[in-house]
Amino acid sequence: MTVRFFVPGPLREFSGGRSEVALPTSPGTLKEALEELAREYPGVARRVLDEQGEIRPHVNLFVGGEPVRFAGGLETPLADGCEIAILPAVSGG
Amino acid sequence: MKTVKAGALEARDGDVLLLVGTMKGAFLFRSDRSRRRWEKSGPHFAGRSVYAIAYDGRNGRHRVWAAPKSLHWGAELSSSDDFGRKWTRSEVPRIAFPKETGAALANIWQIEPGLDDEPDRLFVGVEPSALFESRDGGETWSLNEGLWNHPHRSKWMPGGGGLCLHTILTDPVRRDRMTIATSTGGVYRTDDGGRSWNARNHGIHAYFLKEKDPEFGQCVHKVTHHSSRPERMFLQHHFGLYRSDDAGDTWREASKGVPSDFGFPMAIHPHDPDTVYIVPLQADEFRCPPEGKLRVYRTRDAARSWKPLTRGLPQKDSYDTVLRDAMAVDGEDPAGVYFGTRNGWLYGSRNEGESWSAIEENLPPITCVRAVTVRGLKKARPVRRRRKAA
């Protein structure tokens, strides 16, 4: 089993138009998964993370439906086969 | 002036182009040299703010640069070689701080093509305050480490817009010289091609600091100069208009005749190094036109005196603001002068500011305006349809 990313519409031009991408490896943490995502889909990863590798302030990541802000951030452990959802925060004006 | 909406702009040689950045995207306008009727395209990058926009017409290019920033996905550079029909979007954003700086790009505030005879050189000013340079036409960029490692930098403080490097002035006479301005931090100049930088704020008063005349820390809103006389500079400070005749070594106040010495934008006439345009605002908190009168002020004598230009502009109950990069001049004669407001009005003058009219209203809040005459554009060839073989 692998980890899957849900890619939101604005970033699909960097995922070959796909709404879901699966990683070929089984990363143990969210950080490892994002590093793998950066190798496979750099355009997606660099818009989720800034150049210092931090999650952008108005991007929400959910692992298995749980927001990672309250579950360990980048060190959030991943279960085999889990889904990581990338969602823009409800912010703006 | 009339404006019509166009799906995509069909610019012709000699057209005047207006590039307008807003908090919700960018708009492009074109007109022939009469500047009576404008075509508009946009919004480009709908939903993203555009705080910097520029035109690079060097070396046969007709390239529009823009810096769209998504609240969610960050800021990046994008360019178009066909007046906005298609825009580039890099897989990985081209402007990024090196890992060892620990900094992350917050926004791009200025895009400045370099000197005409160095057509592959460009500069951008960003937030947090830093200067990036490209030597390959904008493909790759590097951080100016001389400025980044300046001992003052850690003491610069963000202004209302953030800690941004918003002004970049190249010097065609002393080619290793460049002047930048950052809010707040003030004016800095290099004379050795960017290796070292020195504060150039002597004479600029900072009422908001403990020391009235500090070496740095001034809240400079805009600096301008003319390429034919680059050592003569004009500066709009957070209170105070200033002039320098020695490329910023010393500044003296030049606020005589304005209803307020507070404001943001400053634009220099395309053919006269002593003619400058500003828009005074009531300060410090209100930041709307004094007495509700939206007035552009112009000096024709190097800021010894300023006169209001009001014809066609609202002269009562105007509660509008013009931001630091939202004013521009074209290269025509008589010069066109343009500015955009936070209430989304784009004004233009075809006669050096003597009279004004609205080119467009109800745009999103306007953050930046640039004007340029398109030169060297090859005439579009009519498309011939191939006959089918019999």
Image: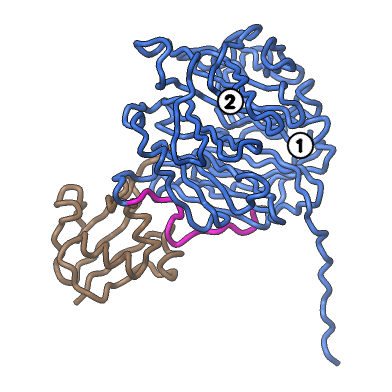
Snapshot quadrant of residue A42: bottom left
Which residue is at the far bottom? B390
Query: Which residue is rendered at x = 52% and y = 19% of the image?
Result: B237
Q: Residues within 10 Å of mark 2 (few under 14, many from 20)?
A: many
Secondary structure, mark 1, is: loop
Secondary structure, mark 2, is: loop
Residue type indicated by callout 2: Ala
Q: Is the magenta stretch mostly helix, strand or loop?
A: loop
Q: Quadrant of the N terminus of chain B?
A: top right
Query: Which residue is rendered at x = 56% and y = 20% of the image?
Result: B236
Q: Which contiguous range is marked in magenta?
A: B84-98
Residue occupied by mark 2: B247
The picture's colour for chain B is blue
Q: Is residue B384 above or below residue B372?
A: below
The picture's colour for chain A is brown
The answer to whether B119 appears left or right of A30 in the picture is: right
| Foreground of the two, A65 or B249 | B249
The alpha-carbon separation of the residues under discs 1 and 2 comes to: 23 Å
Query: Which residue is rendered at x = 60% and y = 22% of the image?
Result: B246
Q: How far from the left and from the top, in percent, is residue B72? A: 38, 48
| Foreground of the two, A63 or B34 | B34
Q: How far from the left and from the top, in percent, is residue B123? A: 53, 45
- Can you tell which mark lies on residue B331? 1
Q: How far from the left and from the top, in percent, is residue A25? A: 22, 74
Q: Does the magenta stretch include residue B344?
A: no
